[in-house]
Image (cartoon, rainbow, N blue to C red):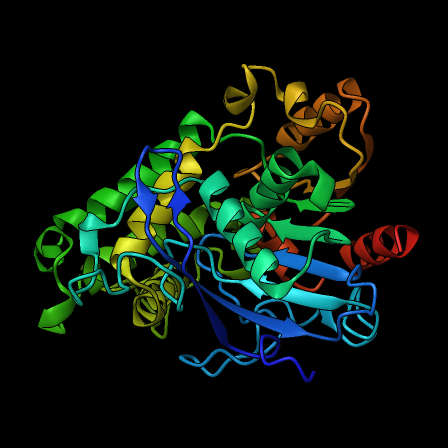
Amino acid sequence: MSDARFGLNRIARLGSPLPLDGGGTLSSVDIAYETYGTLSPARDNAILICHALTGDQHVASDHPVTGKPGWWTRMVGPGKPVDTDRHLVIATNVIGSCMGSSGPASAAADGCPHGMRFPVITIRDMVRAQAMLLDHLGIDTLAAVVGGSMGGMQALSWAATFPARVRSAVVIASTARHSAQNIAFHEVGRQAIMADPKWRGGDYYSSGDPPSAGLAVARMAAHITYLSEAGLTEKFGRKLQAREAKTFGFDADFQVESYLRHQGLAFSDRFDANSYLYITRALDYFDLAEEHGGLLANAFRGAATRFCVVSFDTDWLYPTRESRNVVHALNAAGAAASFVELSSPYGHDAFLLESPELNRVVDGFLRAGA
């Protein structure tokens, strides 16, 4: 692309203030983003990819910290369901995160990291910031907004907040509100971080010694919710880790213990603990019905957006009944909606893993709306 605003690993510095649902304001906003493909002359072929809690803008490019391929390379690329030969694909890092967008780790007006001075944000605040980025890029309408988990919440919020700007929305393994159980798991994670002595009230950046242990425990607890019991049993069962007998101690005797510890440590190397606090709180506050007079259908009343809602039968974090609630509300609002429950042994994480059925659903839906 000749336009310098498009390409990999850009940061848009948006000078306009962003009013927040919590009553505060971000005086200026940085949005880290990547684009793939080419914007059509009519500027009408853009697809926005929204990431999950710990995701980022590196949806189809190597991660600069881990060196691993992008988190959705099987879904986004030339000839893939989100086809970069046909679409300009935009992937942003949400505000509150730690991969270049404004968040607790970014610099405040005094040049120091915001830390806990950063205002609490919501899913709708994230979406408003993304809309500011689209304005910056000169894109009025989106061919589609696509996301799984928290990304699906953003897709729903986009359709509710900016219905005239979204022609299609793909909502995968998601929900219209966080349940008490969801909030409970997140609170365990937040308390693990804040109980780590190295958290220092969120002011740990200058120490070079972040609360990695607390963040690792938070990740371990959350990671369990992303998997299914059947998947864990099939992969690990009660198999021991590199030993022939139990140690009768508190080392990682079982393979599943070693796996969770590895997940926690790897995560703490690439993510910011304060960002984890802020984004989980945004998820917990999410309740699309509450934002629209207590009735979910009100969020989509009169919407011209087409919706595709997908769930997985082993997802107990956002089970199929949550997706059905969204579809019932869409039907009540008169919106065009399709729904499918897919079978997978992988639980909530199924949307990130190889799933030919999901590929076919997303590809068919996006092509039908082209």
Residue at (42% x, 30% y) in the render: 181
Residue at (10% x, 60% y) in the render: 198
Left or right: 71 with respect to 163? left
Judge whether 301 appears above or below 277 on screen: above
Q: Residue 158 is drawn in which quadrant? A: top right
Residue 248 seen in the figure: no
Left or right: 115 with respect to 8? left
* Residue 168 screen position, x and y as percent: 77, 46
Judge whether 177 appears above or below 56 on screen: above
Task: Give the total number of marks visible in the rendering.
Answer: 0
Q: Nearer the viewer, residue 117 or 237?
A: 117
Q: Nearer the viewer, residue 206 or 110?
A: 110
* Residue 136 screen position, x and y as percent: 56, 62
Q: Nearer the viewer, residue 88 or 270?
A: 88
Q: Residue 296 is drawn in which quadrant? A: top right
Q: Residue furthest right?
A: 368
Q: Residue furthest top?
A: 294
* Residue 37 screen position, x and y as percent: 73, 75
